Image (cartoon, helix red, strand yellow):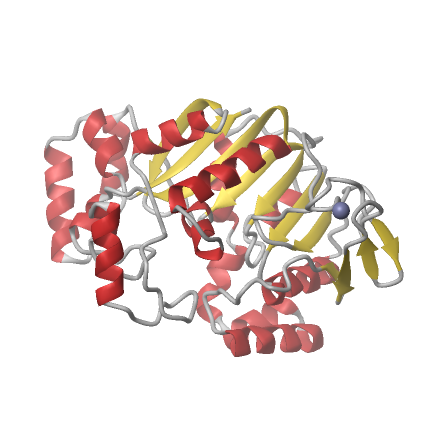
Amino acid sequence: MINSAILLVCPHCGIELRKENKNLRCPSCTDKWVIEKNVPWFSKSSPYWGEIDQASMQRVNCLAREEGWEAALHEVAPQLRNYATSPARTNWTGLLPIQSDWTAVDIGAGWGGNAFPLSQRLKQVVALESVFERAEFMEIRRQQNATQNMQVVAASVHAMPLPRERFNLVVMNGVLEWVALSAEGDPEHIQEEVLKRVHDLLAVDGWLYLGIENRFSYEAFLGQRDDSGRRFASLMPRKVADLYMHLTSATHNRTHDAMTAYRTYTYSYWGYKRLLERCGFRDFQAWGTYSYNRPNLLYNLKDTHEFKQYLQTRSPHSAGKKLARALAMKNVSPTALRLFSPMFCIIARK
Ligand SMILES: [Zn+2]
């Protein structure tokens, strides 16, 4: 039922929750949350978000119960099979001194692409996901895989029912850039608040792993759409990007809703370093990658030789990428690597 090795606490009071029938109740503020389909559900007000629309996601879950989660994924969303199951998703773990007695939380765990491989190497894993249908999918997958050391929790990053100073690793893969969509106020301030809470979840010397886009990725300069769904938005001053979003309102492929303000803030290498240090993290280290969702190869941002080797393994399809590769092969400095890398795999510790 509920994994007793993972303590769930009241998101307001921080006090251990008590289980009463199909609910979890806080003994202090008496708030309660339902356990729905075996998933403690703290995020009833969170909007749907996902790579496929809500009706398709519900169909995945329905089929998963009947035919198994892999068959359901293959039938409804075959394009996401790699994303949900590829072992390469967790290549970034090579950056960390992973220990088998660690407890980790994957924030924004999605389909479980990171959480399941981690559960095979760590003692306990919490897969935290605000969208119920996605949490439901992971719980079906967990049950069908007989994964005992994982707790799936449906909860928002803004109100996590997790105890302080218990986690050796917090994973935020493709999450931080989205957190200001589900809260009001200045996006950078909201990101800082989330990172401070993450810092608080970590045990002494615990690690944060952050997979995220580079604001000044060379691909952004070549016109690749960023998380706002627009070209060039990340490169603009924030207020200009905001106006641009207002003027070009369109349905977004992840929120399935119109996005009319620029809130998906990303940063430069130096911007992430400063942001994490402001939130209490130390030992900032970043690697470059083309995709944090499949970090097949990570390259050291200090080593241009490694980067050139990396480029040789890739065959760019567009003319822009061919040009960028040709330029990079000729002359690339470590500063340019940091400035223009498409994405970063970042680690920092408490
Ligand atoms: Zn409470």
Q: Answer above or below: position of 315 versus 286.
A: below
What residue lies at 27% left-to-right and 25% top-to-bottom? Answer: 303
In which quarter of the view is residue 237 placed? top left
What residue lies at 52% left-to-right and 67% top-to-bottom? Answer: 48
Nearer the observer, 174 or 294: 174
Position of residue 230 measured from the top left corner of the image (x, y, whole percent): 25, 60
Q: In the rendered view, does 303 fall on the left or right side of 85? A: left
Q: In the rendered view, does 27 fall on the left or right side of 250? A: right
Q: Answer above or below: position of 172 versus 79.
A: above
Q: Which residue appears farthest toward the right when viewing the image?
A: 21
Position of residue 311 measured from the top left corner of the image (x, y, whole percent): 23, 41
Q: In the rendered view, does 68 fall on the left or right side of 280? A: right
Q: Can residue 194 be seen?
A: yes
Q: Quadrant of the N terminus?
A: bottom right
Q: Quadrant of the C terminus?
A: top right
For the image, the number of numbered tags is 0
Q: In the rendered view, does 174 fall on the left or right side of 324? A: right
